[in-house]
Amino acid sequence: MTEIVTAAVLVIGNEILSGRTQDANVAFLGKSLNDLGIRLMEVRVVADIEAEIVDAVNTLRKRYDYLFTTGGIGPTHDDITADSVAAAFGVGIDYHPEVFELLKQNFESRGLEANGARMRMARVPDGAELIDNEISLAPGFQIGNVFVLAGVPSIARAMFNGASNRLRRGAVVMSRSIRCHCGEGTIADPLSDVQDAYPEIDIGSYPWSRDGRFGTSLVLRGTDTARLDAAYDAVFQAAVDAGGDPVEEPGEQT
């Protein structure tokens, strides 16, 4: 049996909590991890407060196989993720000599002063392994099972893709989806019966409304293709019996 590998995402930043910035990294990480057979089990959002970040990092890195953080590794005073992660691991933090020189040369070549604020991005916890940043050069880093990524979506994606070869793979979760033209209350009991018969398949229901009509999307997820297909057939028949006029939603089977 293929092992189950789990992960969590910790989103760091007051701008997310205030609603000023909409997170775009969780969906990417969820799908990318699933494609690698790693199950995203939990997402947290915390403010730019060191004690809160330290507590979340220590809780999540012990609970799951991997933890990915996003945000808080830029040049401003509220970018405290690197310091907080160092504190969580009980290690020091200092300028990484190679990163320092790389950033210094880059800034100066662009006519920018390599001032203290910009050079803060060269600070890395002791013992951490760098994660390359091909977009803006300032790297992320990995320490233990924690991967620290930028908050800017394009940079976070580049960092994740660059570090993905370090991750242990698990069983890939496949999904199939049915669009049912009846409410959740109508399909709930037969859906529960199918779930009891296929406990290893995750079956979820998600209501929708469009053009004056309403219904329910029924999504099935599992790692065993044969069992997933059998559960799908049972749910589809249950939706037929409930008068839901079901159809398979395109693009859901993976």
Image (cartoon, rainbow, N blue to C red):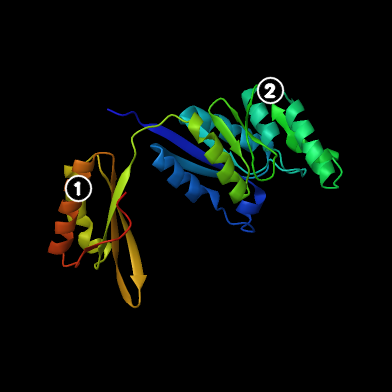
Q: Secondary structure at mark 1?
A: helix
Q: Is residue 7 visible?
A: yes
**Where 223 falls versus 63 (above or below)?**
below
Q: How many marks?
A: 2
Percent across and percent down for residue 134 are: 64, 42
Residue at x-position 26% and y-position 65% = 183
**Where 15 falls versus 46 (above or below)?**
below
Q: Is residue 95 visible?
A: no
State which tag comes first along the sequence, 1 or 2.
2
**Which residue position holds label 2?**
126
Residue 146 horizontal side relative to residue 35, left or right? right
Residue 78 horizontal side relative to residue 8, left or right? right
**Which residue position holds label 1?**
229
Percent across and percent down for residue 35 are: 40, 42
**Where 80 falls versus 19 (above or below)?**
above
Quarter holding residue 89: top right
Dot 2: few (<14), some (14–19), or many (≥20) neighbours within 10 Å? some
Residue at x-position 56% and y-position 53% = 23
Which quadrant of the rendered structure holds the N terminus?
top left
Q: Secondary structure at mark 2?
A: loop
Percent across and percent down for residue 147 are: 57, 34
Dot 1: few (<14), some (14–19), or many (≥20) neighbours within 10 Å? some
Residue at x-position 29% and y-position 63% = 216
Residue nearer the viewer, 38 or 109: 109
Residue at x-position 50% and y-position 35% = 164
Percent across and percent down for residue 41 are: 43, 40
Asked if labels 2 and 1 touch by Cβ distance under 8 angstroms, the answer is no
**Where 191 falls versus 64 (above or below)?**
below
Q: Residue furthest bottom?
A: 212
- Residue type highlighted by circle 2: Asp
- Residue type highlighted by circle 1: Asp
Residue nearer the viewer, 53 or 251: 251
